[in-house]
Image (cartoon, rainbow, N blue to C red):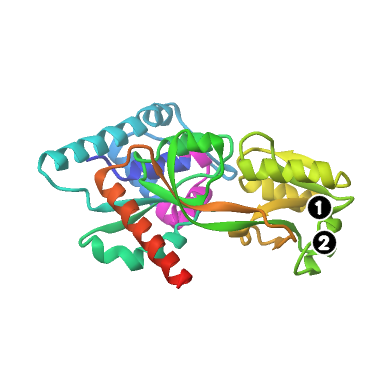
């Protein structure tokens, strides 16, 4: 009901760059630029001032930006209500995907349960890991996308979402490739003495708070440097430029090509699974139920 190019427009505006937006949308820069040129043609206004260093919204673009999200939300709501009135389900599962929360782990589960959802398709919806705005992204679960896959140990997140644990991810450390620790296959706590460890600030994560308390008590030789409560790429870049050690999750081992992630001789793990809305749609709840059954079957198989 709305012009699909509006979502591309919002992404370009947020990144102030066709190239950065294209990477986020999994499109070529040329394709993004063509969409924006076509949108400007259809609307009859210039949306962006284009410069070599990026692009900025024109006055007209700022007005369209203010209303674009409302247009998309109202359109999606109208379609859902119309389908419900007709007695049909919306046969698309919208999976949020980002650099830190890729959708790939869900695809393995989908292969095993897709027979239970004939006619359903999957739609990938990119979102931003920006720590300054991640709570806004979390609040959109059930609106712009139905769920995503990742670690979930955040008190703040759990106030806004439901979580189905499907597994665990080890807490590890990441170091620059030229760091002496990069040659090791297992890091000891003693290896970290005299080093600075970057980790999320205190108060939001149960597991990270336990690690902080443990190290502060038993390994005071390790200096702890606070990072934002929610990681984004800037945190990984800081570890590379500073040369400090980064407390990392196993599932983020390949996020930054200039960092090597290594296991530590401790038993700290993070819950990993499906993060979805507090009040999911009936079809999403049915999907969660099927994933729960799959997990139980796999556990029973391991126990026998």
Task: Tell me the tag on residue 179.
Answer: 2
Task: Tell me the tag on residue 243.
Answer: 1
Tell me the magenta residue range. 13-32
Marks 2 and 1, Cα distance to the nearest angstrom?
8 Å
Q: Position of residue 143 (x, y in %)?
A: 34, 38
23 drawn magenta: yes
- The reply to whether callout 2 and callout 1 are in contact (CB within 8 Å) is yes
- Nearer the observer, 149 or 208: 208
Q: Position of residue 131 (x, y in %)?
A: 59, 39
Q: Is residue 97 visible?
A: no
The residue sitting at the bottom extreme is 304
Give me the residue at 69% from left, 35% from top: 202
Q: Position of residue 68 (x, y in %)?
A: 35, 33
Pointer 1 local density, CA inside 10 Å: few below 14, some 14–19, many at least 20: some
Count of numbered labels shown in the rendering: 2
Question: Considering only vertical position in the picture, is 103 above or below 89?
Answer: below
Q: Main secondary structure of the magenta part?
A: helix
């Amino acid at each position: 009901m709305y012009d699909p190019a509006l979502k591309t427009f919002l992404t370009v505006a947020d990144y102030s760059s066709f190239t950065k937006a294209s990477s986020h949308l999994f499109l070529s820069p040329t394709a993004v630029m063509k969409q924006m040129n076509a949108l400007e043609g259809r609307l009859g206004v210039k949306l962006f001032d284009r410069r070599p260093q990026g692009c900025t919204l024109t006055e007209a673009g700022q007005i369209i930006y203010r209303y674009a999200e409302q247009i998309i939300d109202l359109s999606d709501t109208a379609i859902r209500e119309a389908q419900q009135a007709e007695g049909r389900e919306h046969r698309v599962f919208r999976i949020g995907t980002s650099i830190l929360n890729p959708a790939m782990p869900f695809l393995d589960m989908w292969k095993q349960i897709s027979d239970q959802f004939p006619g359903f398709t999957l739609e990938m919806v990119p979102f931003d890991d920006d720590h300054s705005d991640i709570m806004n992204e979390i609040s959109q679960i059930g609106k712009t996308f139905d769920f995503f896959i990742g670690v979930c140990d955040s008190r703040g997140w759990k106030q806004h979402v439901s979580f189905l644990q499907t597994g665990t991810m080890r807490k590890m450390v990441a170091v620059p490739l030229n760091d002496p620790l990069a040659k090791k296959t297992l890091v000891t706590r003693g290896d970290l003495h005299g080093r600075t460890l970057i980790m999320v600030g205190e108060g939001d994560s149960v597991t990270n708070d336990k690690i902080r308390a443990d190290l502060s008590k038993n390994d005071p030789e390790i200096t702890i440097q606070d990072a934002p409560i929610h990681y984004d790429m800037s945190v990984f870049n800081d570890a590379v430029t500073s040369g400090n050690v980064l407390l990392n999750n196993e599932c983020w081992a390949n996020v930054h090509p200039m960092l090597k992630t290594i296991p530590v001789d401790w038993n700290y793990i993070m819950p990993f699974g499906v993060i979805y809305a507090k009040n999911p749609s009936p079809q999403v709840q049915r999907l969660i139920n099927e994933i729960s059954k799959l997990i139980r079957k796999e556990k029973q198989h391991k126990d026998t």
